[in-house]
Image: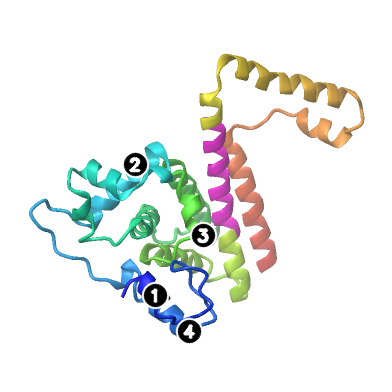
Amino acid sequence: MTRQALHDDGLCTKYAHAYKVHTSCVRCTLALVSTYIWSRPERPERGAGLNRERIVAAAMAIADADGLDAVTMRRVAAEIGVSTMALYRHVENKADILDLMLDAAYGELRLAPAPADGWRASMDRLAREVRAMVLRHPWFATLAHTRPPSPNYVAFYDHCLGALKGLPLSPVRLHAAVNMVVNHAVTFAQMEHTISVQWKDLGAAEREAAQSIGAYLGTLMASGRYPHFTAAMGTARPAPDEMFAMGLDLILTGIAASAS
């Protein structure tokens, strides 16, 4: 049964629309979960060798180059070299493709055994993995909190919780610790990507205007009205790798203090 059919059958009269779940209605939620792509067996390949793996690889390549809006059933089919209708044998719609993309991105994260030097080294490595993955796939952050949990997401989250299992933290604090580390990596990579794209797209006049902001800030600092800001800005700005490491170190130090 499709999402639209579930909606039309009135399993939950409080549906906002066919693609949203009214989570307080157990019957509605369970019925909708049964339609997720993870609950449907993958169909066998036919003559063109089409499968979910080829579909998601093409979709990710499109999104990496042109953004999520460029990912359509027609564009993905053209990228693979099959008809649009051929895709519908393996996915119902674009939502299925987005779910597959997000799961594949999580699947790129290497879940290595815990190192001998403990939880802190594990979380440091995982944060760097997440940052590198988001830089490869800038669209990840858009999907991460809007798509349902997938197998590779659960494997990743389970691995993070396992890395912290020796710490005397409550389950709620363990979740908070994982979220702080992961969110730092994701948001920092988002910032890096945004700055890179915006600067690359600036014309000569816009670059000159952007540089003039520095002169304006210099005027504000010379006024003496912002002593703390002036003192902080007077130091050399670290490179992105160092900035990322500093922020991560502060978070991990806070987790360690909370567990002491």
Q: Relative to 246, is 48 on the left or the right?
A: left
Q: Which of marks 1 and 4 is nearer the N terminus?
A: 4
Q: Marks 4 and 2, how far apart in space?
A: 37 Å
Residue 260 visible in the snapshot: no
Q: Do the residues labelled 3 and 2 touch (CB within 8 Å)?
A: no
Q: Quadrant of residue 158?
A: bottom left
Q: Is residue 175 above or below residue 208?
A: below
Three-letter amino acid code at the position of disc 3 = His
Residue 59 belongs to magenta span: no
Where disc 4 sits, the SS reads: helix
The residue carrying pointer 3 sits among few (fewer than 14), some (14 to 19) or many (20 or more) residues within 10 Å by Cα, namely few
The residue located at (36%, 74%) in the rendering is: 5
Q: Do the residues labelled 4 and 3 touch (CB within 8 Å)?
A: no
Q: Earlier in the sequence, mark 3 or mark 2?
A: 2
Provide the residue span drawn in magenta.
Answer: 180-196
Main SS, magenta residues: helix
Q: Earlier in the sequence, mark 1 or mark 2?
A: 1
Residue 182 belongs to magenta span: yes
Q: Are marks 3 and 1 in contact (CB under 8 Å)?
A: no
The residue located at (33%, 71%) in the rendering is: 2
Q: Which of marks 4 and 2 is nearer the N terminus?
A: 4
